[in-house]
Image (cartoon, coloured by chain):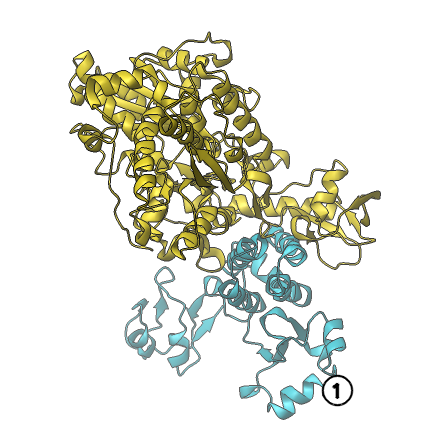
Chain colours: A cyan, B yellow
Amino acid sequence: MGTTLRQIIFTVGGGIMNDRKFKAVQTGGPSGGCIKFDQIDTEIDYESLKRLGSMMGSGGMIVMDEDDCMVNVAKFFLEFTLDESCGKCTPCRIGNKRLFEMLTRICDGRGTMQTIQDLKDLSYTIKDTALCGLGQTSPNPVLSTIAQFENEYLGHIKDKRCEAGVCKSLLKFEINEKCVGCTLCARNCPASCITGSVKQRHSIDQNKCLKCGVCMEVCKFHAVERK
Amino acid sequence: MINLTINKLPVQVNEGETVLEAAHKLGIDIPTLCHLKSTGGCHIESKTGSCRVCVVEIDGRPNLAPSCCTPATEGMKVITSSLRVINARRTMLDLLLSDHPKDCLTCEKSGDCKLQDLASTFGLHRIKYKGEMSKHEIDVSSEAIVRDPNKCIMCRRCEVACNEIQTVGVLSGIGRGFNAVVGPADLRPLSETKCTYCGRCVAACPTGALTEVDHTYKTWNAINSGKTVVVQTAPAVRVALGEAFGMEPGSITTGKMVTALRMMGFAKVFDTDFSADLTIMEETTEFIERLKSGKNLPILTSCCPGWVKFFEHQFKDLMHIPSTCKSPQQMFGAIAKTYYAKKIGVKPEDMIVVSVMPCLAKKYEAAREEFNASGNRDVDIVITTRELAAMIKEAGIAFDHLPESQYDDPLGESTGAGVIFGATGGVLEAALRTAADWVTGKDLKEIDFTAVRGLDGIKEATVKVGDVEVNAAIASGLGNARQLLEKIRRGEAKYHIIEIMACPGGCLNGGGQPYSDGKCEDILTKRMQAIYKDDKNSKIRKSHLNPSIQKLYAEFLGKPCGEMSHKLLHTHYHGRENV
């Protein structure tokens, strides 16, 4: 008690691997909430976490960095609730499933501004009506990510763009002019969708691309770009 | 007493009463879906609080509370119709409908569906939260009950009926989360379980997830097949059918029903009361024999196919004590296709016997392999009271305007003893009337054995039959039957005769009777009063005095429990797996 989030994450935990940028920390397990960098000096106790819209919960912490998409993070936590729901009461059994489907739509680039409103409305009603603690807290990650990272939701909906590059439907890999035609990417592509002659700039067939990112990983010339 | 306010109106309730009950006292009708409470003879209480439709705001509580299972407390301040509450209720219905087939136009339950009613009341004309829907296989394995899990809303009312009231133990929650559904263990087909087809689950189900196997079209086909199609109507049908046409519960519609059946095209309209009288002849003979020998007592009645299947699965060790008599439905079929077919010169294969029953298990009973005394199915088609009502409507018959008419002879003649088979205790009373006469050799006038009447689940009485004091017991509802059977198993029971009916209240409350949203205490009392009124108005009130029955024995059967009777009117039981 009284230790700050920063101390736990950066001192005790040793910080984020590969020096990637801190984005948020989820405290309290899947039913908790996200806390942003500007609140990282908060001292950990029941009251202060609650004030930030999160909770102590299981006492666990999950740290997200710049490579994490917060819409996807909400989806991830909700998936846990879906698995854990006993199915007894309507809001938890069907409501959480609908929240999950709405998040999936946003991640797939099929979300609208109305989807955000529906997510919020349904989340509040689930919290208000669910029978047990699981259901009453299950929408927390949804509400908390919308509150703290609304711009990421808007990015998915308006710009059809996943800033962290996690949501595959919104990704596009392209080969730029740095390509020397070494053919390494073409040989490693599991979908065999990269074509080009030796020593010529290659190109990716977007219709066949699985968006696995192998081409980008193997390229020694930084010629594959994720957009 | 507890004082609280609902929508700022003060109300007083007893300790233990719920917010929902308090609201009712003020005339506030909080909508419910999973909640079910019925008292008296058909006691059932299901308050799982799972649907969350009845939620209300309670001052000082952070979340909405389900009024059906929240006890009222002193000083409680409740709001039942704030925007927050209305919004929550609409959302719950929206979610339920988002995972519901919405094929109301073709749904069996349309018009009797609580979900449909609420959707209409709440003006849900469009589903907001659309998404994936459950995909479960529809179980059509049994002859009696169709289980469509896609229409299940997880209210668990069927589960309470099956496990707590009937103690059959077939239905329970299966799976988790979105995949959760109510069904038999391993979701095995109903036909492979110990389901008794009593139909209490169907009566309790608020949606179309549990319905009967529909035989109305099969019946129309039969009527128009060119064969001789005869129909029998069970005693409890006549006092409930009127409800389907807006008549008061307890209206005796016998005459109109007979007219309607003739108009529908049945060649002959007969009465199961006739074969109920026949059952009494056989069963009472069997009873007196056992009483004299002191062996295999108590004798248990065997008219109810749900009850028969129950003991075949769960009380195999006691299979020697039930009477070997077939039920009135099957006795009728056997006699119609032998004695009557011969009388009118029709081959049994050219005759179709249709039954109208208040029961779903009767559908299963008619399909039991051994019931082919005539060499053909003794009873070909069984429809319920609900199905008959649907057919009358389909035929465009204005039921309430019909003139009354009489059953055909000879299988339509019956006594008051036959009609009371429809109420719990009736079979036993009818047997006692005959037994008393036979034992004393007199035509006794005191024939109202009122001690065995009423809707109590278990009734006990000591009745004088001649010089013998007969200890009788009656159980209606399989949970009550279990109590008596376990007493017998432990050797604690000193009964001579026991009547058992699977449905609480007897056939009056059968699984095939018009739906009443599971709430039936008043309706049941009225149906019962009608049954006993019909008995009181009968010219003959003892089965053995039925002239057509006497003629049947003289011309065909010989004597009760004789060789011919054993061939046609008695049966044997099969031990079945208890799964």
| Res A30 visible | yes
Relative to A72, residue A187 above or below: below
Give SS at disc 1.
loop
Quadrant placement of the N terminus of chain A: bottom right
| Res B170 visible | no
Chain letter of mark 1 equals A
Towards the viewer: B186 or B96: B186
Give the amino acid at mark 1: Gly
Towards the viewer: B538 or A132: B538
Which residue is drawn at the image coordinates 37% and 41% (left, top)?
A: B306
Residue to which mark 1 is pinned:
A2
In the visual, does A149 lie left or right of B345?
A: right
Relative to B430, residue A6 above or below: below
Residue B290, given in percent of the width and then of the height, sits at 31, 40
In the visual, does B535 lie left or right of B336?
A: right
Residue B391, given in percent of the width and then of the height, sits at 40, 21
Residue B445, given in percent of the width and then of the height, sits at 47, 21
